[in-house]
Amino acid sequence: MKPTLKIITLFAFLSTLANCKGLDETDRIQNDVPANNIRPVGGGCDGCKLMYVDMPETIQATDTSAGWDETGQKLLIQGTVYKKGGKVPATDVIIYYWQTDNDGYYSPKKGMGEGAKRHGHIRGWVKTDVSGNYSIFTIRPAPYPNEDMPAHIHTSIKEPNIADEYYIDEFVFDDDPLLTRKKTEARENRGGSGILHITTVDELQVANHNIFLGLHIPNYPD
Ligand SMILES: [Fe+2]
């Protein structure tokens, strides 16, 4: 073998060894992988950490939001959270929710943690009980003024055995004229469909809504 060919062969061999070590720095940045090469469950999200701002030490399976005593259509969202696979109820799963008020604004209130003000004052937490159940008493959020985005309630999840918090599909309403077919088809279905089916009991609107952990959640552990 000629000396030049030997050098090329050696370089190719060393390159192969380097690739076997995994992602190099450029690959890591291009693939949005943190320095420890562990991808966050759910892929990370803007604002999910705000669930910890003003979070109470004890969280019940039922929560009544600040909106309940304000003007607006009263709404109960209740259901069961299931573990991956969809059959076994998941206990001690925290669901954090935040929503607009009856005018379509994330309106902050005095005394709120500074970082959480962008989520408005109608926010809260529930933690699933031994049967995986949760209930949220709140009001229907109004859509953003002068926009065509459907009215929605944001939700993020913190599971007891997963370090990362992550978002699931925001709750929207099947009777909302702004929820077009195109917008429905564009939804990610993270945790299952977030489209709430509304029934009315006396003057209360009720949505029975189950959540399926791991469904369409990137990097979710097996
Ligand atoms: Fe929003």
Image (spheres, rainbow, N blue to C red):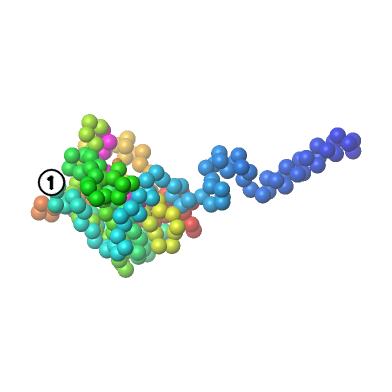
Image quarter hosting the N terminus: top right
Is the residue marked by circle 1 packed among few (<14), some (14-19), or many (20+) residues within 10 Å?
A: few
Q: Residue furthest bottom?
A: 130
Percent x, y of residue 56: 30, 60
Quadrant of the picture in which ligand 1 is shown: top left
| Residue 173 seen in render | no
- Residue 31 occupies quadrant: top right
Q: Can residue 151 be found in the magenta stretch?
A: yes
Seen at 30% across and 50% down, the residue is 113
Q: Residue furthest top?
A: 146
The amino acid beneath tag 1 is Thr
Q: Nearer the viewer, residue 36 or 80?
A: 36
Percent x, y of residue 139: 18, 49
Q: Can residue 51 be found in the magenta stretch?
A: no
**Relative horizontal placement of residue 25, taking residue 88 as reference (left or right):** right
Question: Magenta residues?
Answer: 148-156
Percent x, y of residue 146: 22, 31
Residue labelled with disc 1: 71
